[in-house]
Image (cartoon, helix red, strand yellow):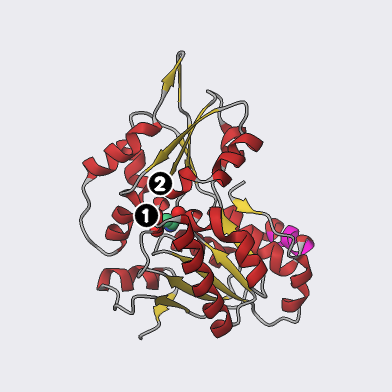
């Protein structure tokens, strides 16, 4: 899975007029940029607004009640202000909790990001799958229900890390990070059982794709790291344009002629100016800071 399915085809007509759609992408920090870059590839002409709730980071440490109240309040204000055609909650920690309430509260389709357990269970040959996420995501009933529904034949190890999202933030902000800390955090993902070894690890936090090169280097053996970002971007395309249009996009892929993308906007709820390294990272993702 990895995307939370939403029957949003009713909204497709809203953007059929040729006007480029506006998509608001939200995360607790800069991890959601891993989803934004795939949305940009799938919808090159879309106007993108990226909002990082850095004042609330890390979401992995918030109680469920605090998280629901915070995200619902923020998203209600952000949607009223930006009037997007669709919203992407590019955060597993929030999506595994807030989606039903957000969909009831917001007048636009909401696409979530939830642990990609189904593709992982389909891919494993050893039957040993690990899910690397925040402590919040691994504790959710939603995550357990996904395992129950899609991974019954596999043994799933849930690994909650309270450090990795912060390390990914630091890296994107140009700060040095401690490889031994990364190694310690991923170590519980690697399980041996009855002569078999874990062969698939789900990246169930949008920050982690920014550490994948280190994960690969520090892993005790090779595994497939599953990042659902491209599937989420395809879902955004389908919600905005419908299934048929998506098949065309899928066939033509990068070859399809597209209008040049305008830079998107990045906003930080703390109001703190981002470090120069982060400004550069945002620019590489086609984003200008709201204060620019
Ligand atoms: N990027 C968020 C996720 O996908 C989590 C980071 C945090 O703890 O705030 O779960």
Residue at image location 53% in from the left, 75% down from the top? 48
Disc count in the image?
2
Q: Earlier in the sequence, mark 1 or mark 2?
A: 1
Q: Position of residue 284 (x, y in %)?
A: 39, 69
Mark 1 Cβ inside 8 Å of ligand 1: yes
Residue with the most extreme top position: 194
Answer with left or right where residue 15 lies relative to residue 129.
right
Residue at disc 1, secondary structure: helix
Answer with left or right where residue 167 lies relative to residue 51.
left
Answer with left or right where residue 202 lies relative to residue 11.
left
Residue at numbered disc 2: 135
Q: Give the magenta part as a residue range.
A: 244-249
Residue at image location 64% in from the left, 79% down from the top? 20
Disc 1 from disc 2: Cα separation: 7 Å
Q: Main secondary structure of the magenta part?
A: helix
Residue at numbered disc 1: 61
Residue 195 sits above or below residue 246 on the image: above
Residue 38 is a magenta residue: no
Asked if marks 1 and 2 touch (Cβ < 8 Å), the reply is yes
Q: Quadrant of ligand 1?
A: bottom left
Residue at image location 28% in from the left, 58% down from the top? 171
Residue at disc 2, secondary structure: helix
Q: Position of residue 270 (x, y in %)?
A: 34, 75
Residue situated in front as seen by the camera: 19 or 193? 193
């Amino acid at each position: 899975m990895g995307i939370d399915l939403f029957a949003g085809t009713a909204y497709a007509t809203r953007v059929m007029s040729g006007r480029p759609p506006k998509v608001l992408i939200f995360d607790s920090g800069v991890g959601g940029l891993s989803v934004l870059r795939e949305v940009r590839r799938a919808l090159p002409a879309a106007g993108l607004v990226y909002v990082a709730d850095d004042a609330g980071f890390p979401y992995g440490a918030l109680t469920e009640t605090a998280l629901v109240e915070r995200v619902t309040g923020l998203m209600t204000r952000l949607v009223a202000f930006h009037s997007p055609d669709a919203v992407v909650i590019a955060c597993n920690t929030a999506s595994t909790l807030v989606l039903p309430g957000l969909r009831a509260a917001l007048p636009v389709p909401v696409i979530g990001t939830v642990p990609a357990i189904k593709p992982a269970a389909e891919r494993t040959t050893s039957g040993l799958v690990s899910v690397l996420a925040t402590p919040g995501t691994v504790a959710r009933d939603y995550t357990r229900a996904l395992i129950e529904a899609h991974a019954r034949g596999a043994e799933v190890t849930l690994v909650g890390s309270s450090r990795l999202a912060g390390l990914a933030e630091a890296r994107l902000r140009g700060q040095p990070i401690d490889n031994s800390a990364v190694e310690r955090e991923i170590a519980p993902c690697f399980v041996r059982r009855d002569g078999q070894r874990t062969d698939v690890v789900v990246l169930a936090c949008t920050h982690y794709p920014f550490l994948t090169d280190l994960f690969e280097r520090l892993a005790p053996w090779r595994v497939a790291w599953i990042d659902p970002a491209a599937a989420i971007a395809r879902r955004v395309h389908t919600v905005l344009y419908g299934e048929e249009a998506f098949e065309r996009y899928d066939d033509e892929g990068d070859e399809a002629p597209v209008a040049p993308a305008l830079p998107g906007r990045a906003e930080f709820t703390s109001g703190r100016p981002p470090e120069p390294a982060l400004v550069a990272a945002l620019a590489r993702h086609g984003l200008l800071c709201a204060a620019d």
